[in-house]
Image (cartoon, rainbow, N blue to C red):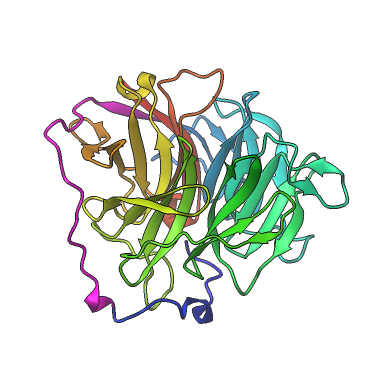
């Protein structure tokens, strides 16, 4: 994450960072995955011999989030271009990319998180239609789409928020939007009418210097990844052991610390595995933006190892999203996005067992 971070937004972080001690690192188990997985690159924004993507899409620049329509299309939020691509499961374009606005509604923004809305809630003002997809961005913009060539701004929190992830969840019959506000160090929440809701999302033992980086609903619980904030750049700080994952209920109640330190490295991608991918389907996959590796945990947060390729951890530079929930697709595919070349370019593809 390289843009739009305002130093004044990070007063919440207690320093110095020398006081930070990570003492509960991920416990490695004996049954580390030894299976080989292969990476297939479907789409990139550049014709690069290193990646050899099957198709070029110049709008796929630093793609972050993935959201999936139950009917099959894959939607991607590309921070670098301010566009949202719509692909089939092999990376073919279904419709032209949708513009995601910045603070100026006529100018592309910097979207990061995207989530599909299958409810009748979250009606877009002035349209009478519920949002099909909702976006957040590092520019502090929340926007929504239900047809047309561009999303519509729902909230402009530029100057107070840097949004790096989004998900939906519910408490009883009430549906909510949850967004990771990296700048403010908290989870922002809205109800079905896009009104602010105050929820705690407090880890009483969170070390100083960490901020929520991504959030995703998995098995009716909210998983939140945390990255260390660099005190100079205010971006995520890369480094092995710099990462935390917590679990909360949808009402913001802390459930447990899921993972701390170990092989985590600015973790962002979150996905539940499938039996087709790992033979069991009971693992939580956590991708590192910091070094491009994918960590495997069981449902209790016990470390199982990393996804391997040719006997070594598979690495995807600039790794962002992980997605297994794609209807009509081989259940063994794990889709990914990546901001390759230091986020200057983009890559979309999948990983599967050989």
Does the magenta stretch mainly form a helix, a strand or a loop? loop
Given residues 10 and 282, the one toward you in this image is: 282
Describe residue 251's horizontal placement relative to residue 282 as left or right: right
Tally of numbered discs? 0
Q: Is residue 196 magenta?
A: no
Asked if residue 190 can be seen in this view, the reply is: yes
> Where 148 falls versus 212 (above or below)?
above
Furthest-left residue in view? 30
Which image quarter holds the C terminus? top left
Q: Residue at x 31, y 65 (%)?
A: 205
Given residues 47 and 168, the one toward you in this image is: 168
Given residues 274 and 138, the one toward you in this image is: 274
Question: Where in the figure is residue 116, as x and y percent of width and height?
Answer: 63, 38
Describe residue 168's horizontal placement relative to residue 297 as left or right: right
Asked if residue 148 can be seen in this view, the reply is: no
Describe residue 339's horizontal placement relative to residue 106 as left or right: left
> Where 331 falls versus 116 (above or below)?
above
Q: Quadrant of residue 213?
A: bottom left
**Which stretch is magenta?**
17-39
Question: Where in the figure is residue 11, as x and y percent of width and height?
Answer: 46, 81
Question: Where in the figure is residue 234, as x and y percent of width and height?
Answer: 43, 73
Q: Residue at x 87, y 44 (%)?
A: 128
Q: Is residue 30 magenta?
A: yes
């Amino acid at each position: 994450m390289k843009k739009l971070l305002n130093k004044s937004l990070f007063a919440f972080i207690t320093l110095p960072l020398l006081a930070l001690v990570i003492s509960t690192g991920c416990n490695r188990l004996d049954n580390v995955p030894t299976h080989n997985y292969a990476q297939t690159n479907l789409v990139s924004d550049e014709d690069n011999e290193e990646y050899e993507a099957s198709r070029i899409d110049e709008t796929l620049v630093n793609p972050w989030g993935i959201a999936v329509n139950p009917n099959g299309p894959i939607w991607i939020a590309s921070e670098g271009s301010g566009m949202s691509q719509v692909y089939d499961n092999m990376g073919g374009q279904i419709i032209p990319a949708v513009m995601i606005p910045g603070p100026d509604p006529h100018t592309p923004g910097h979207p990061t998180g995207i989530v599909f809305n299958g409810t009748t809630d979250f009606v877009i003002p002035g349209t009478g239609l519920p949002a099909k997809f909702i976006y957040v961005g590092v520019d502090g913009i929340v926007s929504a789409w239900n047809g047309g060539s561009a999303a519509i701004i729902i909230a402009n929190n530029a100057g107070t928020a840097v949004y790096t992830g989004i998900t939906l969840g519910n408490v009883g019959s009430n549906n909510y939007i949850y967004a990771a506000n990296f700048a403010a160090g908290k989870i922002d929440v809205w109800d079905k009418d896009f009104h602010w809701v105050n929820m705690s999302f407090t880890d009483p033992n969170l070390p100083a210097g960490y901020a929520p980086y991504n959030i995703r609903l998995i098995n009716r619980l909210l998983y939140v990844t945390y990255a260390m904030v660099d005190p100079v750049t205010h971006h995520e700080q890369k480094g092995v052991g710099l990462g935390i994952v917590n679990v909360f209920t949808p009402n913001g109640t802390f459930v447990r610390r899921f993972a701390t330190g170990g092989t985590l490295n600015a973790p962002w991608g979150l996905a539940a595995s499938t039996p087709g991918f790992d033979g069991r389907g009971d693992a939580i996959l956590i991708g590192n933006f910091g070094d491009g590796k994918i960590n495997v945990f069981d449902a209790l947060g016990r470390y199982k190892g990393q996804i391997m390729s040719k006997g070594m951890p598979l690495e995807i530079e600039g790794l962002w999203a992980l997605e297994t929930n794609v209807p009509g697709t081989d259940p063994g595919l794990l889709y990914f996005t990546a901001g390759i070349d230091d986020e200057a370019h983009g890559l979309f593809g999948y990983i599967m067992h050989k």
